Amino acid sequence: MGTRFAGKIALVTGGAKGIGGGISRSLSAEGATVVVADFNDDAGRSMVDDLTKTGGVASFVRADLSKRADADAAVATAVQKYGRVDVLCQNVGIYPYVPFEKMTEADWDRVMNVNLKSAFFVLKACLPVMQRQRYGRIVLTTSITGPRTAIPGLAHYGASKGGLNGLIKGIAVEYSKYTITINGVEPGTVLTEGVVEQFGEGFRDQPTSRIPLGRLGTPDDIAGAVLFLASDDSKYITGHTIIVDGGQTVVE
């Protein structure tokens, strides 16, 4: 086990599976105490079991982060149990496929609530804690979809991720005086459990000719960039996003 985050308390939202799971595992492997906030009880508890079995310290809090009370409770749980929150990885997100001509207000609102409003709620709960500490590292998971590229049927998803990029810039400026950095990662096409569940097993075999590195991304690929932005190696970086896509946007 590494020591890069020894003594740090990290809250990972959507941290039970997929990209969030990769972030939780990577932070724990580098010595962080990890609080996993997720809507999925079984997956969340399983993640915590896995982290503790490998020598980590971790806790699970069930939370629907599109609700203000649950976001407040997730942060409060971390503070009550461990005294502080040094790292926030806001990763929770959904991507239901709906062609725009069939998209309803309910479809739109659901994606915005989970992907964008949840970030507002979690940040509102966490930033006062980091202000008091006069220290914090915040990393939001956005996407190349929306800010850089488009996928038919995911207009609402793309809009929510573009919103996150704007949020990152705005609050980074406001909170820099507290030694809080706020950045994001923009994953490209990443093979996760959720993607396979939604798009089928055939997704594993989709062509990768338009990805210069020649393969789909993995949660660990994204986690590597997140750990950089969550560490003091990036202490002079704030208000930015890192594209982690194997070169996909270079050729598109």
Image: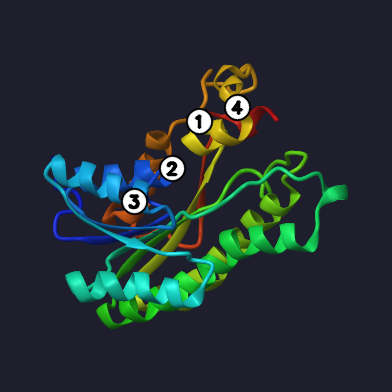
Residue at 73%, 39% in the rendered image: 151
Looking at the rendered structure, the secondary structure element under dot 2 is helix
Q: Amino acid at mark 1?
A: Leu
* Disc 3 + disc 4, Cβ < 8 Å: no
For image coordinates 40% across by 76% down, the residue present is: 72
Mark 1 vs mark 4, foreground winner is 4
Query: Which circle's residue, 3 or 2, is located before the other in the chain?
Result: 2
User: CA–CA distance between discs 1 and 3?
Assistant: 19 Å
Q: Residues within 10 Å of mark 2 (few under 14, many from 20)?
A: many
Rounded to the nearest angstrom, the CA distance separating label 4 from label 2 is 18 Å
The residue singled out by tag 2 in the image is 19
Residue named by callout 1: 191
| Front residue of this view, candidates 244 and 62 | 62
Residue 20: image tag: none
The residue identified by callout 4 is: 200
Residue 184 shown left or right of residue 47 in the figure: right
Residue linked to disc 3: 44
In the image: residue 103, left or right of residue 49 = right
Q: Amino acid at mark 2?
A: Ile
**How would you rate the neighbour count of disc 1 (Cα within 10 Å): few for under 14, some for 14-19, many for 20 or more?**
some
User: Is the C-beta separation of discs 1 and 3 under 8 Å?
Assistant: no
Q: Nearer the viewer, mark 1 or mark 3?
A: 3
Label located before the other in sequence (4 or 2): 2
Secondary structure of the residue carrying tag 1 is loop
Real-space CA distance between mark 2 and mark 1, rounded to the nearest whole angstrom: 9 Å
